[in-house]
Amino acid sequence: MDDIKLIQVFVEFWGAVLCSVCALALILIRKEEPKSSSVLSAILGNIVVLLCCDALSIYYMGGYGIRAYYCTRICTFLVFFESLMISFFAVMLLMEVLRDHMIILSSRWHIAAGGGAILGTLDLLINLFSDRIYFVDGSNQYHRGSLFFLSLIFPYCIIFIYILLLVLYRRYLGLREKISLWFYALFPLCMSVFQIYHSDLSLTNVAMAVSAMVMMLQRLTEQTFLRREARIQIEQKLHPREESDPAMDERLRRATMGKGDVKHIFIVNPNAGNFFKVEKLRTVIGKLPEQDYFVFTTRGPGDETELIRQIRHYFVGYKLRIYCCGGSGTIRNVMNGIEDLSTVEIGFYPCGMTNDFLKVFGKDQEKFDHIENLIEGSAIPVDYIRTNHGVALNTFSTGMDSNILKGKDRYKSLTVFGQNVPYILAMFRSLLTTRARDYIIETDGRDRSQRSSQIIFGNGGVIGGSMYFTKDADIADGRANFFFSNDHGSVRLLPAAFTLMKKKYNRLPLYGRIGSAQKIRIRRRDNRPLEMDCDGEMVYGYSEWEAEIVHKGMNLIVPKGVMLHE
């Protein structure tokens, strides 16, 4: 065996090992992944067989003996057969990727790709008796037949179906998905054309392995809708909520034995952005009398909603003052657990990164940083946002800000370098990747449909910590302010973003539509689910949204002497 063949065997062997590891990884995490990743694991499995067979056929080519005779012939057949199967699974993969984006294709595409694979297999079986495509001579050497090009027709036809689907449905795919899917088709295709003139090299098989591994990396990092939903379901199965927690039941029972008619309930989110502030809060609350001051710590994302429902069940007949100690999402989740918000008093002790809602209080915002001020404060009636999928206190939005939230989740492991690092990276990524969508919008019965990259419907006046979309924020006037950006995406959003950050309200009409309304209805023209940001909490899976301002529908606890900022 010459050096070139030895290198090919070495490369294909280790390529098979890497593909085996990748396929095993996808199998192990299959519960968290959509079906498209299962198809990709099948592709990787077929590539493992392809590389092993090709390596064995090269190794035994020209050899003598029964083992070399059968191994060369069987492996050569399997190389052609696996090339067909991998092409067929490529179409299946693309169809499942589109399904991840809620695009269900007709079964005729399955039939077309499957028909090509079946015809190609029949052609290979016929070749076993005719040597038209390839043959192995008496000295165990591989040779192409007179009709070798027939072996390329069926795989190329299947890949053509793949490329056709990729072109037809390209607008439903993200940028990285498009790159990896095109690379998966074009790289092996180019290598196969090159191999037509250099038959002694197995470049196509190696190209298939490389492109499949690139696809795997993309699939593991892409946050598709179905993957998010699958992870939520798995998390719920791994950590089911107990209907009755004995320890909490006992603490609640003792709390109801207190002498006062008012119960001060502290809901503490230990995972809020300002960790040190949360720790300091624990020390302060620990000094309060246990009979009427009661502290609960959340266990995970969204735990506040179920927690407050259980608390209200035990404290029937008492006046409740609930202090939400966390970020904007903490108070929003607490509000979602209360059917009638006018029956309780809710305070916001800010431990999050931005705490946007409190900016309506201007300089008085600093007074909220002292829990003693809140305990001694009084409640004022304020507006809040009620939607057909939950409530929000500050904003209800989609677009660039929702992309930032998704990015924060993706980069959350980088908090070791600083609490703001994930947010900064997510913001830059969002500016580069956000695209305008075609929305059907109605405010107070008036049609305002347009293409936009940012939709904001706000009770407050700030979103994302630094984007001021109105100077007229009033949380007690019964109306919300809105901002619908123009048809700008990617880097063209930068001027609009800087205008929002610098509070240049007079320039906002240059970058979008502004106004006020009590109600809004919104959906995408293509009826795909919206990714909504409700007070910094992402809500997925709903294609139609309705929201309205509930005028003075909740009682907000404010520190003594605090007035609404004009």
Image (cartoon, rainbow, N blue to C red):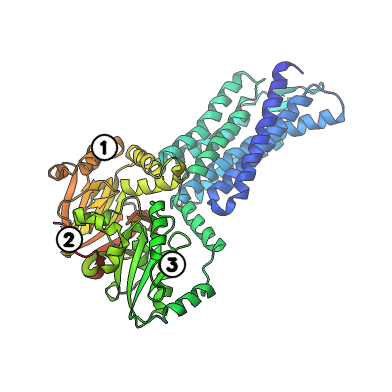
Name, please, the residue furthest toward the top.
2
Q: Which mark is residue 271?
A: none
Residue that mark 1 sits on: 494
Residue at x 62%, y 37% (from the top left corner): 84
The Cα atoms of the two marked residues, 1 and 2, are separated by 32 Å
Mark 1: give few (<14), some (14-19) or many (20+) Cα within 10 Å.
Answer: some
- Helix, strand or loop status at disc 1: helix
Image quadrant assignment for residue 270? bottom left
**Of the residues shown, which amino acid type is indicated by label 1?**
Leu
Residue 311 in sight from this viewpoint: yes
Mark 2: give few (<14), some (14-19) or many (20+) Cα within 10 Å.
Answer: some
Along the line of sight, the residue nearer the viewer: 240 or 355? 355
Question: Quick check: 389 above or below 506?
Answer: below
Residue that mark 3 sits on: 296
Question: Quick check: 389 above or below 537?
Answer: below
Residue 555 position within the rendered picture, expressed as x and y whole percent measured from the top left: 25, 70
Residue 448 position within the rendered picture, expressed as x and y whole percent measured from the top left: 19, 54
Counting labels gives 3
Residue 337 in sight from this viewpoint: no
Residue that mark 2 sits on: 564
**Quarter that holds the C terminus:** bottom left
Along the line of sight, the residue nearer the viewer: 251 or 429? 251
Residue at x 35%, y 38% (from the top left corner): 428
Residue 376 position within the rendered picture, expressed as x and y whole percent measured from the top left: 27, 68
Mark 3: give few (<14), some (14-19) or many (20+) Cα within 10 Å.
Answer: some
- Helix, strand or loop status at disc 3: strand
Q: Are marks 1 and 3 in contact (CB under 8 Å)?
A: no
The Cα atoms of the two marked residues, 2 and 3, are separated by 29 Å
- Helix, strand or loop status at disc 2: loop
